[in-house]
Amino acid sequence: MTYASAVEYLYGLQKHGIKLGLHNIRAILSRLGRPDRRYRAIHIAGTNGKGSTAAMTAAMLSAAGYRVGLYTSPHLVDFRERIRVNGAMIAESRVGELVTRIAMLAGDDVPLTFFEFTTALAFQYFAEAQVDAAVLEVGMGGRFDATNVVEPIATAITTISLDHEEYLGPTIERIAYEKAGIIKPGVPVIGGRLNEEAARVIQETAAARAAPFHRLGNAFDAHGNQAAFDYAGIRARYHGLSCPLEGRHQLDNAACALALLEAAESSGLRVPPAAIKQGLAATRWEGRLEIVDRNPTVVLDGAHNPAAAGVLATYLAAFRAAHPGVRIALVLGMMRDKAHRPFVHILRPHIDELVLTQADIARAATALELRNGLIDVMPSLHLAPSPGQALTLARRLVTAADLICVTGSLMLVGDMKALLRGWSLSPVRG
């Protein structure tokens, strides 16, 4: 297939929806010769923060001279963002070749979902690229996520909060149980900023599987700010580190990444202090408190659940404190199945204008649907039917000294990035 036809084929697989389970992914990987067993894997789950943690981990390993695969989801603009080796996206030609091969091997008896197919594609590409290690972000949950076929050398669970309840369960404990499904016998597990209910479930699962459990704030921690922070780890100590990603929460993610590397050291992945410092400073992770324009400042953030809204609220409060008199306009677009009212309620004290819009995807709530659910939370609302119109309207509502924040969905963030780059949107968004 050509790249265009391969992406169209993958898009067509979305008709299968989301089917959590490992039968089909194991079947296709078996037909491929189990490419996932040809490199060391680091496996990262969590409601929020797992992508940033994965990006930092991969960057530090790359700085140490390793050949490193990074598999994340979703992409923002280009499908190939999901699959990288040492920061370089998979080539379009390889996507076409591998989609053709995997489709032929799957045949009619292994009906792969979009995510299962993409996971198999990534695992095969990493094997053919002869990576030393692959850093893998869980798509959803953990126990039945397609990535959970790997036999990792270290795992992490960054945070746990309510999200995807229709698939993972309605309580923190149930969601923690699903995410703890990535814990393997004897394999170290790193825990991030976890509440006590979640920590208890993860600790019990780790104990039952004889997996060493190291928790942020207990076994390791980071202190300072993005410009200069110190890491006190399981064994290691680092001083004067820096992280270019915005938000105090990124220090938690950096600490998790550093703890993961400590846990992976016994498997031969040794990262010297110079590579730690260089890799962290070089980390790039788009769409998470990412400043993309000035005068006014435009920030893109993929927050889409109440826990992430809390992190965003902290950032907005700090921005306002540092810029007295600033006005903040929020451009919001969310999926229909998300908690719209709690999300906006958390952000309400920090915003002056709210512009409602929708991402270019069928699952997105329309601006009118959002309005109908939010009118009593924030009576002064503006509606714009498309992301481009929403950004134009927001710019009219503020001055050059103010802030526009685009949030509510990584899909909306991807739409905005495409518009700002002058690109057309990728049809595959899940």
Image: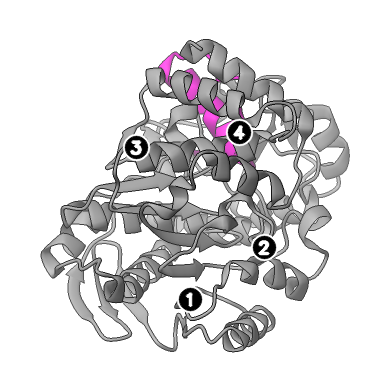
User: Which comes before the other along the chain, label 4 or label 1?
Assistant: 1
Indicate which disc residue 143 carries.
Answer: 2
| Residue behind mark 1 | 189
* N-terminal-most mark, 3 or 1: 3
- Highlighted magenta segment, given as a residue range: 401-430
What's the amino acid at mark 2?
Arg
* Residue at left offset 14%, top offset 69%: 273
Q: Earlier in the sequence, mark 4 or mark 2?
A: 2
Q: Is residue 322 left or right of residue 186?
A: left
Residue kind at label 1, given as amino acid type? Val
Q: What residue sits right under mark 3 in the picture?
A: 128
Upstream in sequence: badge 3 or badge 2:
3
Which one is in front in this view, the residue at disc 4 or the one at disc 3? 3
Is there any visible trace of residue 425 in the rendered image? no
Percent x, y for residue 66?
21, 53
Q: Is residue 228 left or right of residue 149?
A: left
- The amino acid type, in three-letter code, at marker 4 is Met
